[in-house]
Amino acid sequence: MKPAQFTYHRPASLAEALALLRTHGSSAKSLAGGQSLGPMLNMRLARPDHLVDLNDLIELDSVRVSDDMVEIGALTRHHRVANAPELRRSLPLLSAAAASIGHYAIRQRGTIGGSLAHADPAAQLPLIAVTLGASLVIAGLQGTRNVVAADFLQSIMTVDLRDGELITALRFPLPVGGFWAFEHFSRRHGDFAIVSVALNFAQDADGKIDALRLGLGGVDTVPLRLPEIEARAQGRPADEDTIRELAAATASAIAPEDSAQVPASYRRRLAETLVIRAFQSALNREEGA
Amino acid sequence: MSDAFTEIGRALPRKEDRRLVTGRGRYLDDLAFPGALHVSFVRSPHAHARILGIDSVEAAAMPGVMGVFTGRDLDQWTTRLRLAPPIEGLQPTELTTLPIDKVRFHGDPVACVVATDRYLAEDAAECVVVDYEQIPAVTSIEEAFAPDAVLVDETLSSNMVSHQSLCVGDPAARRAEAHRVVSARFALHRHTHAPLETRGCVADWDDGRAHLNMHIGNQVPHPLRSQLAARLGLSESQVTVMSPDVGGAFGQKIALYREELAVAALSRHLRHPLRWREDRMENLMAAAHAREYECRTRAAVSETGKILGLELEIDEDFGGYCFYPANYMARVIALIMTGPYRIQDYAYEVRVALTNKCGAGPMRAPMAVTSWVMEGTIDAIARELGLDPVEVRRINALGPGDLPYTMPTGEVLEDVTPKETLETAVAAIDVAAFRERQARARSEGRYLGLGLCTVIESTTYGSEFYKSAGIPGSGHEAAWVRIEPSGAVNASVGLMGTGQGYESPLAQAVAEGLGVRSEDVTVHMGNTDIAPYGMGSRGGRGATAGGGTLYLCALKARERVLAIAASMLDLNDAGGLRMRAGHIERMIGEDWQKTGLALTDIARRAYLDPLALPEGVAPGLDFSHSYDPPAMTYSNSTHACEVEVDPQTGAISIDRYIVAEDCGTVLNPIVVRGQQQGAIAMGLSGALLEQVIYDGAGQNLSATLADYLVASPNELPEFEILHHHTPNQRTPAGIKGMAEGGVMGAIGVIANAVSDALAPHGMTIERLPLTPQSICALLQEAATSPAKRTQL
């Protein structure tokens, strides 16, 4: 459990970091919070020749809320995402999901950019990014490009990030409706969820569901957004029958695989249950508020 | 508890906490050894394979590498571990320090790399090329016992390394005349100890003195020293074992493991200090595992649920190597199975299988499965006969009139209170009110369950038990107490704490016996040059064997101190004297009055003015004592808990948890409470979360803490603890010992509670752990085949 040998770099600016990443190409890995890369290095599952430590790039630890979007710097820690008042107001779904990551010490280190780059299919922040239609700002020496989260996340721990590139920020559109919920099921507090569900919607004047966004984690190689379920919900009353129907349809729409410990049927069952609970908690919260 | 005690029973804070909670403890890694070399082991990626060759040429040439050593090398410098106690049905086994021809489990060490730092050692370990020829792996008891099974140990005639049975009375006749014969099954899964601090050691061979200083966190320093000396061909004078602070052991730090012996042998060979720290993956994969049992019971019962006879079969998956005699754990389970119940016609059969998994060893409550099996059998009787499970317990439980009670295996229970703890727990949890809540909840589609589990905990094994059970070993313990010239009190005992919090309660045992304040006593443990030869810490023997021996030794010291005091006060004898808080008091009329004489005065005379001592009294105040406890000492408890099972997710929440426990005289209630909480937590963690998982090819799939799930406080309820204090009449100060019963009770009570919750579905828990996916699978099965009662 000691990492293989690597050369350690600690750039003081984004430009310097990008230059290092370009110089060393695929033999370099960038280190943000280290909550996943650290263990992978120690278990020698990751064996970069060069480690580029991003922790001095303070310009990437930022939260900016404008009229139509929220931009969060890639080095922003989960703790800040969970607790910053401007985020809890503008993106409560994201804050709630961030608050459920691991434990306090982990949230003090882990970063939003790192979570997206690592792309664990059960992780919270990729799920919320997909559900809310966030995009990533990716810098390279040639300039920057924007990629929507759903395209960025390609498979288990596989993302659209080329050699020499770095995620610098996530941009979230402001959600359209005030109803939201994040539900996840894990065997212990703080573990990666077996299945997680995120949703966000509005209600029209008659109480009908409008603009539902529904995302699921842990049921595929990447977080899934389910547009067909979202379309089916449009204009329907947010009552128990509808919710149950949508939940059952969700369970049919996903195709999880059997794993050593968790059969696919169990994930499906959890997905159905958690969709119901997510709707209920969104509606209950709104009533309470 | 006796009111006569002034030091025993005080709620003194744990003395060690000051250093431990302020980060000033000294664990193995806090000890500096300039120039020490580091060790890393090359481990087998296969469950079962022949070693055709080991090529270490490249590794040995890498920078910083001092050598790569194989089983063949170490076999020249160490003797083999031969376990051949004269036990009927136990096949003798022998193993080398590292495997030479064959590996027997995924993680088996095959070579040892020594380098100037751990990073380089791991780099080189990767470059050692081992040529393996894979052999089919034996990964279950069923496979092990199959007629054409591959042999795990090719020197044995079969994989059934141990097989024993006993029949007392006539259980077959009881079955024939019974109203009903109730069968039940219990499969407990493989656990591992997962101490916060993994194994590790520093072997520091002093070549000039030809002496090995072995720094190692270990529960049994003296037996470990004997093992080290024997396996290295040294005398016990040439080995000192020193245990620094230890971050948990739970039974994992008793045996001398192959890695530790290899490190010691290589320190001598290289004439250099060597250090090894096991990493977490190694610990989970290759340290020691425990608890993998399949048990079946058949109870012959009357119409009222009275048990007429009981038959028990236990099969244990022991893994690939015997670091302990293979009958060691399972046989104790069979010996104490009937526990709190009146049963005389009893038979057992115990079979132990070698498989291609990590070797098994004792883990906090090596007999942990016992209470689940017995109490699950009681619940099965209640279910099949339509009786109230509380009533079935009452009708069979041993009451005061039954004691002392000789169990069918010959074990004698005395001074235990299973009926009393049962009634306390039943009253406290209010079974009647719960049943009403449960009925209401069921009508709303919610599933609540109540479990009960009464525990008879074997705590302290005397030599007589080992002898009669056919298990090699001694149960004695040894202590010394020394009052220094200043009056300071030092003491030592052969135990070694690994986090239990020994320092206060053991000081209290000394203080009580001697008549000083506990705060003024220091107990030294863990260094074999200082501590007397005792059998160390295992089971629940710390208080009875360790505390008891210290108490008796301190009584000896007190007698001398009072005799000297009497002469200093010009009295004929010490009859009217006592010592309290280090001051000599004299009974004058009805009252104890201070004499003005203190322990410091007596100590000064004993050491510095010995000519003034009474005739026949030798100078100094130095005492030693050894003590062999009764064959077996028992504590008892009843656990009760309420659960709710979420039928949608399979999640189990524990709504209430009560334990009524009788562990006799309590040395220190703070430490006892910590042990009660810790033991219950460990039991629940095991029953709900922890599981060592091997796939069909013998690959270990649970070698990280993301896969081997240990409960955190978030997953555990509050524990309500109710006390009974029935002293044992035969032990010093009435001490009984405790700290494992909580594990036994927790496993049984949670399984029984979940079975109760699932009763409307006709489902019973027969297999642990209670994962949410397994609960959902059970419910799904119930929905599709309503008649079926077994668990997947």
Image (cartoon, coloured by chain):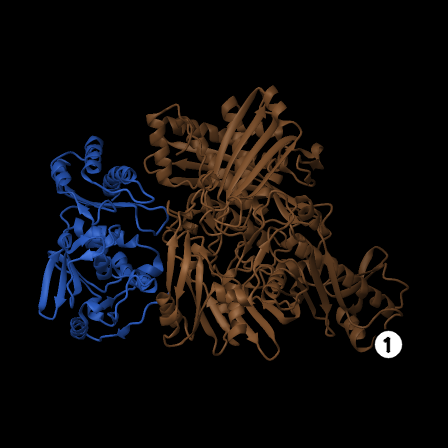
| Residue displayed at 61% across by 42% down | B636
How far from the left and from the top, in percent, is residue B74? 51, 66
Q: Is residue A58 above or below residue A196?
A: below
Where disc 1 sits, the SS reads: helix
Q: Please state, as top left, top right, bottom left or bottom right, where the C terminus of chain A lies in the image.
A: top left
Q: What crowding class fits label 1: few (fewer than 14 Cα within 10 Å), some (14-19), or many (20 or more)?
A: few
Nearest the viewer among A173 and B522 is B522
Left or right of B217 in this view: B468: right
Check the image and report above or below for A178 versus B340. below
A152 and A236: which is toward the camera: A152
The hue used for chain A is: blue
Chain under disc 1: B
Residue B554 x, y percent position in the rendering: 74, 61
Image-quadrant location for residue A13: bottom left
Vertical order, B273 against B574 (above or below): below
Residue at image mark 1? B611
In this orientation, does residue A268 appear? yes
Between A257 and A32, the one lying in front of the other is A257
Say which colour chain B has.
brown
Residue A228: x and y in percent read 12, 39
Is B444 left or right of B140, judged from the image as shown?
A: left
The residue furthest right is: B572
In the rendered structure, which amino acid carries the disc numbered 1?
Answer: Leu
Residue B77, how many percent across, how many down?
55, 68
**Left or right: residue B608 compared with residue B658:** right
